[in-house]
Amino acid sequence: MLLSSPIGAFVRERDGWCFDPRIATLDVDPDLEIYLGDLPGRLQALSRQDAPDDLEARLARASVETRPPLRTAPMPDSRAKAQSRAAPLSRRRVEQARLRAGLHRLETLAPELGALRTRRVRVLEKGPKGGIACAPARAIPERLKDLSAFIARNRQRSWLLTAIYAYALFLLIHPYEDENGRTARQLFAAMLQAGDDGGAPLAISSVIILFEGEMSERMSNLVFRGSWAEFVSRISEIMRTYIDLSIEVTMGDYDDRIAG
């Protein structure tokens, strides 16, 4: 029976086995920067542009199936799901400002972002192992504290890699009863903007959610194989698609590229 993983351990609880991420031992690996290339500069340039108020909804409708270097088409229902979850700019601005203000103290945000879960939950059910149970409920406060320390320790060294790591680790902790995926995506976007003076939040959620089925498989590989390089590489591809689509819709060239 598998009792450990490269990035954590499987622990026995009364209601079954849970995966407990080993956050304190993780560190940003400078070698992974090779997978990011010019992405940090492109993100910073994009964050300085004025985007339409409905950018996230537009991104949810835009076609990404044939856009290289993406290798897997979105799930059939992912476009409708992305459109339904495209939040108004005002709501995203509030959520991301709240997260941005608490990047170093995630463990104190539970009352604002949702009650901490008290039961066992399974995620990655579409992955090759049939899903895993996330961090034990009793360990959630300590894991959020560990994640806050991880962000504080590494953000100045590599803000983009730290954001990618934090996104995955937050999902593996799965601290709240509901809205964990949305909160993880908003946390990711907030971290990408953490050095800015404000401005419109990055509307990356609708692009990430288009590939949630594939991301489940990548995160399973992360748990069972410790494949941070594979995960970082894939996230960087999705973010390049986000940047390209954002530029297109901002410039008004997107109407003829909508699928269907």
Image (spheres, helix red, strand yellow):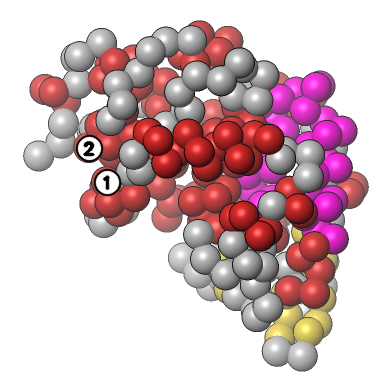
Q: Say if 28 sits above or below 25 in the image.
A: above
Amino acid carrying mark 2 in the image = Arg
Tag 2–tag 1 contact (CB < 8 Å):
yes
Asked which secondary structure carries label 1, the reply is helix
Q: Quadrant of residue 137?
A: bottom right
Is residue 233 something one can see in this rendering?
A: no
> Residue 209: image x %, image y %?
40, 47
At label 2, counting other C-alpha atoms closer than 10 Å, the crowd grade (few under 14, some 14-19, many 20 or more) is many
Q: Which residue is mark 1?
A: 83
Where, quadrant-wise, is the C terminus in this rendering?
top left
Magenta region? 142-171
Amino acid carrying mark 1 in the image = Gln
> Residue 106: image x %, image y %?
73, 48
Q: Give the residue drawn at x 42%, y 55%.
A: 213
Q: Say if 186 sits above or below 146 in the image.
A: above
Answer left or right for 9 relative to 233: right
Kindly identify which numbered label has been placed on residue 61. Answer: 2
